[in-house]
Structure formats: C-alpha cells, structure tokens
Image (spheres, grey):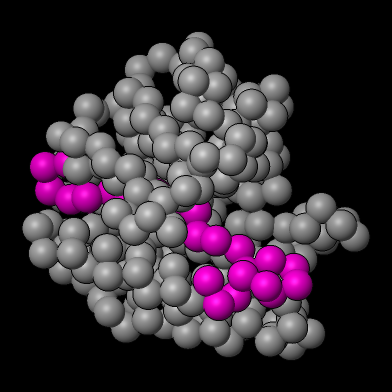
Amino acid sequence: MSYNLISWNVNGIRASVKKGFENSLKELNPDILCLQETKAQDDQVAEALQHVEGYHIFSNSAVKKGYSGTAILSKEEPIEVTRDIGIEVHDQEGRVLTAEYEKFFLVTVYVPNSSRDLHRLGYRQTWDADFLTFLKELEKKKPVVVCGDFNVAHKSIDLARPKPNYNKTAGYMQEEIDGMDNYTNAGLVDSFRYLYPDTIEKYSWWSYMGQARANNVGWRIDYFLVSDVIKTNILEASIHPTYMESDHCPVGMEIGV
C-alpha cells in the first residue's frame, strides 16, 4: 500500500479557502493532507473546511487566536490522533498534531520562527531539542513520518541567496542549521534530498517582497522527514510551486508501507 502525502503551510486556512484551496485539494488529491499555520481555532477550521468531502479532519489550535495552528485531513481514519508534545511551554501554540496509522506515525509540525530580530532563537533551539526527543520516543513504537514548516533552509542549496542570509536572517542561522543537522544525524531522512541530492532552485517559500516568487528567489523550508528504516519506501518527493493560495507551496511525498 502506498500513501500520497501533502504538507502545506496555508498561512491562514480561511484566507486560503477564499483563494481556491478546495479546488487545489481536489487536484492534489492526497490520501493525507497536513496543514500548518491555520491561524484559526478548531471550530473555525471546521467551518472553513465544511464543504470538504471524503476526509476526516483534525486540528490543533493555539491559545492565542488567529495564530499558528496545525491540521490533518485524512481519507483513512487514523488509529489515534494526539495534540502537542507534552511540554507545557511548547504546547500553547498548536504546533504539533500526530496521527497514528498501522505502519507509521504521521506528525505535522509548524516549527517556531526565530523572529526577524532573532529574539526567539534561543527558544527555537530548546524547541528543536525537545521535539526531536518527542519524535525519537514515537520511533520506539513504529516508524515516523514528520512533515511541515521547519522554518530553516538546511543547506546552501536550499535557498536562492545563501551568502547574504547566512547568520544574519532567521531561517538560515547556524543554530537553526545545527538543529536540522540534529534531526538528520538522529536518523530522520529528508525525503526530497534522499531522492534529489543535487537538484537546485526548488523552493517552498517566497517572501511577499521584491517579486521574490516571480523571480524564484525562495527558500526550501518545508520538509518530509522519515525514519531511516523506511527511507527505501520513499517512492517520490515533490514540490508544487504553481499553487498560489499561500506564500508557501505544497510539498509532497509518496511512500509505500
């Protein structure tokens, strides 16, 4: 059996629906869709997606209204869905939602941004460490697929302008890169780079400023990571830049389990 998985930071689910999200969902036709930055409470997510058919819908909202938030839309009903990671300081912003299936756990995550002035960089490092511990605990039970907006370009190949941004811009600070290294060094495999190690100019986020998207001056900050034991089950990894409902585009992975 294979699963067609899509992850998408929609930068506000209600805004995305107004821009054509439902048609895009039908075109992409994922078995499971993972969303980040829904910017809505659970009841607002349900209302925004009320016309979506064929999916079980789960969401995790931030305490602060209109901020952060994650969701999973799944054709197959999961065995169990759990919110957050069990650490109070991290569990206020609806950033993690986990669905258990027969052969794997699927985790959607919206990793905290270090902020333009970098005031959250220290918190981001704590988050990365604690989230990795959470994933490794899940892995003791069955393999993990984790996807979402990690808010970091891992390698210089993953952003259009690495030199002017390195150690100056949130998303390409060495501390954030180290955090991503820790995920991959712990046996979580970047599905896109596993299949396409040298492919350039493939990005998943573009600034709204300076015609960045039109000129493809972007960053690849949205990922599918999988447990090393199932990396050979990765059938395809994809990026879909033509979908314009958000400043992020959908990223995909097909995996056989």
Which residue is at 32% across, 31% downward? 74
As drawn, 45 above or below 95 = above
Residue 202 in view of the camera: no
Toward the right, the furthest residue is 210
As drawn, 22 above or below 227 = above
Q: Which SS type dominates the magenta stretch?
A: loop
Q: Is residue 22 magenta?
A: no
- Where residue 184 sits in the image (x, y, percent)? 35, 78
Which residue is at 29% across, 54% downward? 86
Left or right: where does residue 144 sit relative to residue 28? Answer: left
As drawn, 132 above or below 5 = below
- Where residue 164 sits in the image (x, y, percent)? 79, 85
Quarter of the image that includes the N terminus: top left
- Where residue 244 sits in the image (x, y, percent)? 70, 40
Q: How many circles with numbers are drawn on the protein?
A: 0
Q: Is residue 116 magenta?
A: yes
In the foreground, 240 or 184: 184
In the foreground, 234 or 246: 246
Which residue is at 38% across, 55% downward? 88
Magenta span: 101-123
Left or right: where does residue 59 sit relative to residue 175? Answer: left
